[in-house]
Image (tube, helix red, strand yellow):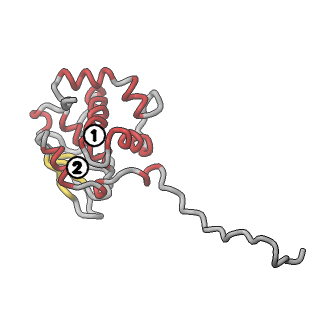
């Protein structure tokens, strides 16, 4: 068919935008937050946050880089460490009594109650970090692959975590509302 110069021309189509990051690539990383805010939050619980150089091994990391690591009262993280990992590992230390905390190196617990408490507390503490909050943290937990029997971090937190909340409350570990 010949080209008709009087026919309306379609506007040029812009190339499609690159797909939004998803899954593990979409989670919030420590380098996107003010380091002092994260360090200050952990300090409230007697923990010290240590910045690890980009690309360097993370001491005490159970899952390996870029996951946070724990040794005693110290939490180690790089700029590419997911915020959910930083909070989760810190919460493992927070839920431990001081005499057990001192002995931790890499693997903080073998208790289901402590694991559940750490998951619950990390969601609550996310509200104390600028630009994070519990909604973002729960979405990141799901994107990273945390597994909950109700299918998502939010469903677990809202409908199946009373035992974790009660465990934390009994030990005075929940921040004031």
In the rendered view of the protein, which quadrant contains the N terminus?
bottom right
- Give how far across and how far down residue 160 sits, in percent: 38, 23
Question: Among all residues in the image, which is located at the extreme right?
Answer: 1
- The reply to whether residue 108 is visible in this rendering is yes
Residue 65 visible to the viewer? no
What residue do we see at 21% from left, 52% from top?
A: 76
Q: Is residue 139 left or right of residue 177?
A: right
Q: Which residue is mark 2?
A: 60
Foreground residue among 108 and 128: 128
Residue 85 lies, in percent from the top left, at 31, 46
Give the class, few, some or many, for how many residues have Cα within 10 Å of label 2's Cα (few <14, many ≥20): many
Image point (25%, 21%), residue name: 166
Residue 146 vs 32, above or below: the answer is: above
In the visual, does 154 lie left or right of 30? right
Q: Is residue 9 left or right of residue 25?
A: right
Image quadrant occupied by the C terminus: top left
Along the viewing direction, whichever of 36 and 88 lies nearer the viewer: 36
Which residue is disc 1 drawn over?
127
**Callout 1 secondary element:** helix
> Residue 79's x, y, as percent?
28, 58
């Amino acid at each position: 068919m010949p080209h008709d110069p009087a026919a309306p021309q379609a506007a040029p189509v812009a190339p499609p935008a690159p797909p939004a990051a998803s899954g593990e690539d979409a989670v919030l990383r420590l380098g996107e937050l003010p380091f002092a805010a994260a360090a200050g939050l952990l300090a409230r619980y007697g923990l010290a946050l240590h910045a690890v150089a980009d690309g360097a091994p993370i001491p005490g990391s159970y899952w390996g880089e870029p996951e946070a690591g724990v040794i005693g009262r110290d939490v180690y993280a790089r700029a590419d460490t997911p915020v959910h990992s930083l909070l989760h590992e810190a919460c493992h230390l927070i839920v431990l009594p001081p005499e057990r905390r001192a002995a931790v190196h890499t693997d903080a617990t073998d208790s289901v109650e402590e694991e559940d408490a750490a998951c619950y507390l990390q969601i609550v503490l996310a509200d104390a970090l600028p630009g994070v909050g519990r909604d973002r943290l729960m979405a990141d937990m799901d994107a990273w692959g945390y597994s909950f029997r109700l299918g998502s971090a939010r469903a677990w937190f809202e409908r199946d975590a009373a035992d974790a909340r009660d465990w934390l409350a009994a030990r005075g570990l929940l921040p004031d509302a």
